[in-house]
Image (cartoon, rainbow, N blue to C red):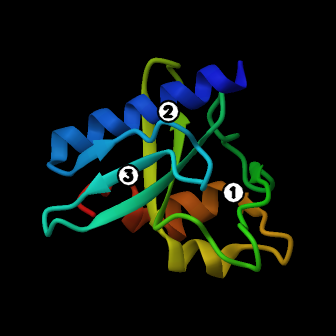
Amino acid sequence: MSLKKGKVAEAYVWMRLLQHGPVPYVPLADIEGADLVVRTADKKLVKLQVKSRGFALPKTGGYGYQIKNLWRGENTLAFDYLVIVLPQNNPQEHEAWVVPKREVRRRLTPRGDLNLTLKLLRQEWKKYHEQWNL
């Protein structure tokens, strides 16, 4: 089931990017931590790492979801943007946050884990909600 929800999330990101202009490419293999490579309007190539889960975050505060071990090698990140895709109340509807690497890095634990909470997504990272113009 984990692979299926991951592929659904990647397809959602792919569709939303095409709707907003950037052209996504799917690598043949995920060997360097990039789920999608995107050509931006200024012809730059950026790498996206897509993370999802099968259900929406709880409506109450506190612990929501942990993305584990995002470090690649010596405290480096192998992507330019982390895209967090969460289903809404209806499993057919999704929403996403397209977060630049610098913002992700600031939030990681020493082990490279990221704790997602409603406060982080709805308040602190609100400006990255559905931001598809890379």
Q: Which percent across, then down, holds residue 125?
A: 49, 67
The answer to which quarter of the image holds residue 78 is bottom right
- The residue shown at (73%, 73%) is 108
Judging depth in this view, the residue of 70 and 115 nearest the camera is: 70
What's the amino acid at mark 2? Ala
- Find the distance from the CA under tag 3 to the CA under tag 1: 24 Å
Residue behind mark 3: 37
What's the amino acid at mark 1? Leu
Residue behind mark 1: 116
Q: Which mark is nearer the camera, 2 or 3?
A: 3
| Label 2 element class | helix
| Label 3 element class | strand
Q: Which percent across, then down, holds residue 5?
A: 60, 25
- The residue shown at (31%, 57%) is 131
Judging depth in this view, the residue of 23 and 119 nearest the camera is: 23
**Which label number is shown at residue 46?**
none
Which of disc 1 and disc 3 is earlier in sequence?
Answer: 3
| Label 1 element class | strand
The answer to which quarter of the image holds residue 73 is bottom right
Left or right, 77 with respect to 73, comes to: left
Q: Is residue 1 shown above or below 108?
A: above
Left or right, 81 with respect to 4, comes to: left
Residue behind mark 2: 9
Q: How many discs mark residues in the rendered view?
A: 3
What's the amino acid at mark 3? Val
Q: Is residue 58 shown above or below 122?
A: above
The answer to which quarter of the image holds residue 18 is top left
Q: Where's the N terminus, which quadrant?
A: top right
Q: Residue furthest right?
A: 111
